[in-house]
Image (tube, grey):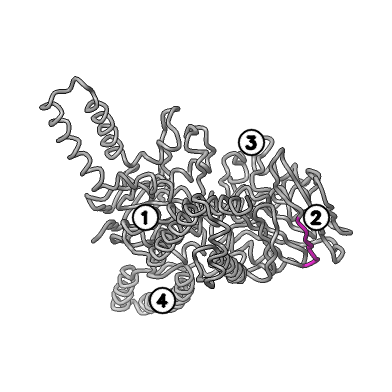
Amino acid sequence: MLTINCQNLKKYNAAQLVLENVTFDLHHGEKAGLVGRNGCGKTTLLRLIAKLDSPDGGMLAISKSARIGYLRQIPDMDPGTTVRAMLESGFRDLLDCRDRMTLLESRMSLPELGPDQLETLLDEYAKLQERFERDGGYELDARIDGVADGLRIPREWYARPYVSLSGGEKTKVGLASELLREPELLLLDEPTNHLDMSAVEWLEDYLPGYAGACLIVSHDRYFLDKVVTKIVELEDGESTVFHADFSGYAKEKEELVLRQFADYQEQQKVIKKMRETIKQLLEWGRIGDNGKFFRRAASMQKALDRMEKLKRPAIDRKEADFELRLTERSGKQVVSFDGVEKRFGSKVVLNGISGELHYGERVMLIGDNGSGKSTLLKLMLGECATDGGELRLGSRVEVGYLAQQQQPENPEQSVLDYYRIQAGMEEGEARSRLAAYMFYGKEVFKPVRMLSGGEWTRLRLALLVLKKPNLLILDEPTNHMDIPSREALEEALEDYPGTILIVTHDRYLMNRLAQKIWELDSGRLAVYLGSFDDYKAESGRKRAAASSAADNRRLARPGTVREPKGAERERSKVKGSANVGKLEADIAATERRMAELEAELGEPGQDADSLSRMARSWAEREALRERLDALMERWMEEQEG
């Protein structure tokens, strides 16, 4: 069933033609990626589909029954609206039903109520309860908690006013709200930008089984490979559809451009020959005063005018020239730290971590939000001191640092003035260098506050390379960059001879560049050799080994193995108390239920109901895991007592 049917769509922004010939369709359940350079019209197209704007030409048909969810549409909420209320916003009918049931319960408890009145209330209550149960009302809390857990939305946020959240936090809560509403058409604009890696991986697992259709704008190539089966590319206002994931699209795109260029060259040869023939016929006609030659030339000119001219495909589009050089190399040991500790109040951020960074290494630093990545960078940059241990920079180390959230001191300053003053150079040279970073013409006079996230990163990188550092420390450098800019930066980093330390969630970048991965988790640092895929395989093996060890410990618990009769009698004598017996029964029952839930989670379904059940099972399993730990602690206390 078609959810979107778009034919020859056209849209102007004032006098500028943004979309000219956009044609594609999207079927129910299909997941498609929308890609293209920054400014090519991706957000414009999403707004048209979301019915926030109207097209200026062509046809855009959306299934009448389709509810549309649009992530970038952050609503203006009442100041008193909490995060919990925002997450529940798609369940208004269910919540109204629950409120009515609560009201009826209080009325039915009144002593002065007559039999007829009670029967009427009971009848209404039974109907409401049936509807509430049918529509999943009793599983509502588990559904909300399951999605919130997946996207790393902590329970402490639930009571916070939605308006008090940061932009990134609002986006995360907005995404959770849209997923919970389960619209038939889900439009996502850069959904992974404010998520840590665990949340991105959860979303990657969730979306392929999502029942509705999804159109996703993303520059995260790894994410697109995992989620989509179709790519809609916008280029020069027109669309091209590729039935593949991102990697397949990239390969097909290259082959298509080469074919188009060959066809263009062949047509140009034909056109050149026709023009030469027309010119020759006109010359012959003038020399011989023969109208036959003029008529033949006119006929050929008409044929040439009617010919559909092929566009010259862009083989090598201009990209930013991230020319990374260094003045001199550093010593072999660039950074070393031993037993480093860092606390903020009672919170331990870094708990005795140790490591080394050597000249020429490319290391990626990963970890969940709040795991201490930025703190470690600040220690290396000398912006704060350790609370224990030692951190040292090697000899002749020149650091080039790109911060993630740096803001300009004067937002009204033009791009040209900002660069010229920071770089300390004349206007002519500054304009020439800015052109290498894709800032042309009037663009250099734009205030820096009007730059997009990707443009602001490009401008700061343009200044960074002037320092010619031998140690690059980059904090999320590819955030907000379009795919061509990311690829240009990756190529420059590949050729860079110095040392690189990058904080990133960009798994495509890690697979291309990483020689080593540092993972921060719970204040500890783990080191993995190789790319992101190598890290995933090794960390998966470690988790499996830890899980196996935990299973072995559980098998050694009372009631889970058959012991010799004599030992069992001795153990019975030692326990002897009713408390211990009840604890063991609770432990056994909890473990049985956890095994049932793990079996359910091992058989995922593909529809929305299956996903909801999985979320509930996951939430219940996590709650049971905590209960089991508490029971085991109490059992140990009884044994020791």
Residue with the mark numbered 3: 411
In the rendered structure, which amino acid carries the disc numbered 4?
Answer: Gln
Query: Looking at the image, do the residues carrying marks 2 and 3 touch, with CB atoms under 8 Å apart?
Result: no
| Quarter where residue 89 is shown | top left
Location of residue 327 by image quarter: bottom right
User: What residue is disc 4 on?
Assistant: 267
Q: Residue 339, which numbered label?
A: 2
The segment highlighted magenta reads: 353-360
Q: Earlier in the sequence, mark 4 or mark 2?
A: 4
Nearer to me, 235 or 430? 235
Q: Is residue 345 above or below residue 225?
A: above
SS at circle 1 = strand
Q: What residue is shown with label 1?
A: 20
Badge 4: few (under 14), some or many (20 or more) residues near its Cα, within 10 Å? some
Comparing labels 1 and 3, the label whose residue is closer to the camera: 3
Disc 4 vs disc 1: Cβ atoms closer than 8 Å? no
